[in-house]
Image (cartoon, rainbow, N blue to C red):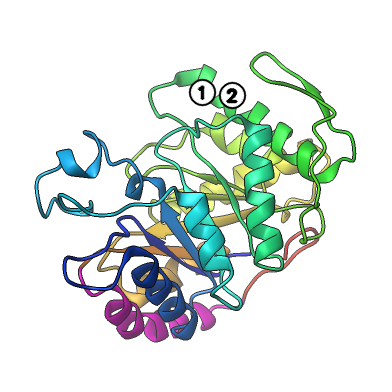
Amino acid sequence: MTRLGLWVEGLSAAPGGPDLLAAAVAVAQAAERSGFDSLFVSELADVPPGGPPGDRPAGAAGRPSTGSDVYEVYSLLGALAARTGYIHLGAVPCGAERRPPAVLAKIVTAVDVISHGRGELVLGVDPDSGDEGIERLAERLQVCRAVMEDESPSFAGRFYEVSGAVNRPAPVQPGGVPLVVFTQPGVTVGPELLRVAGHYADAVVLDGDDGAVAGAVELIGEAASSNGRSPSSVQLIWRGGPGRRPDELAARLRAGADGCIVSLAGADLPGAIERLGPELRDAVDSVPARVGPGRS
């Protein structure tokens, strides 16, 4: 899974430049050349807050300018899957994912098949949804797992119910596509969310200092053990914003993180990726990876 990932929040076509698909392919291929093993595209690139692209002021930071082209994010990932070689691909929802979980599992399975085993299924949670949002997340994770792993999946919960949702072709990755819980930047991640991730997810993405990382690793490991899983079966990925120094990534890995994700934005994303990637890759590789049972 992710050791060094890239999160791109605002994929759009610049006026007078290549079209959106060509621009997105350039970003993905630059990430592959520069040492990133995962690329996450934000769904904010599809429907920015405040309305469609034409309703946004030109040049709004991190968002498409007026008149910019945008694609549905999973359609874009499918195209990138056919034009890249090894980088894993995932879409970051804005808050809680709105698609029915069984449908989402089917969509991401297609990305996994097209990419020959490089799909990532990312789920978020609305920070204002309280306990109900955490409960919904737990059920969504269980539904997605069942649809990807079982021949005839069945689940009945408070919010979702699935019976016999056949998912063919099946995911390429053994055990199905990895399930990633992606928390929004600056949002306090409570113990209940971490316990849900420990019970049902394959990875959780969060920010914070060394102490927050170490505490989250311990809590997730305890939750995994309580659900009959290996404590090392859930990957913790630390997320850093633009301008993060390589030594910060190395510090978070030493504190217990398994991988790191950085976010970038700007007009020359391929150039920025190629300038920053090798330095970040060296920093990540300077800290030995901890690989345990159930973790790839």
Span shown in magenta? 267-288
Element type where label 1 sits in the image: helix
Q: Quadrant of residue 113?
A: bottom right
Give me the residue at 33% from left, 80% from top. 276
| Label 1 CA crowd tier, 10 Å (few <14, some 14–19, many 20+) | some
Q: Judge left or right: residue 24 versus residue 213.
A: left
Query: Callout 2, which amino acid?
Result: Arg
Give me the residue at 20% from left, 69% from top. 267
Q: Are marks 2 and 1 in contact (CB under 8 Å)?
A: yes
* Picture disc at residue 133: 1
Give me the residue at 57% from left, 55% from top. 236
Q: Which residue is mark 2?
A: 136
Place of residue 140 in the rendered image (x, y in percent of width and height, measured from the top left)? 64, 31
Place of residue 142 in the rendered image (x, y in percent of width and height, measured from the top left)? 72, 33
Main SS type for the magenta part? helix
Query: Callout 1, which amino acid?
Result: Gly
Place of residue 171 in the rendered image (x, y in percent of width and height, measured from the top left)? 76, 55
Instruction: In this rendered view, identify the residue nearer to me: 282 or 214.
Output: 282
Q: Quadrant of residue 155?
A: top right
**In the picture shown, does residue 251 fall above or below 150?**
below
Instruction: In this rendered view, identify the residue nearer to me: 257 or 92.
Output: 92
Element type where label 2 sits in the image: helix
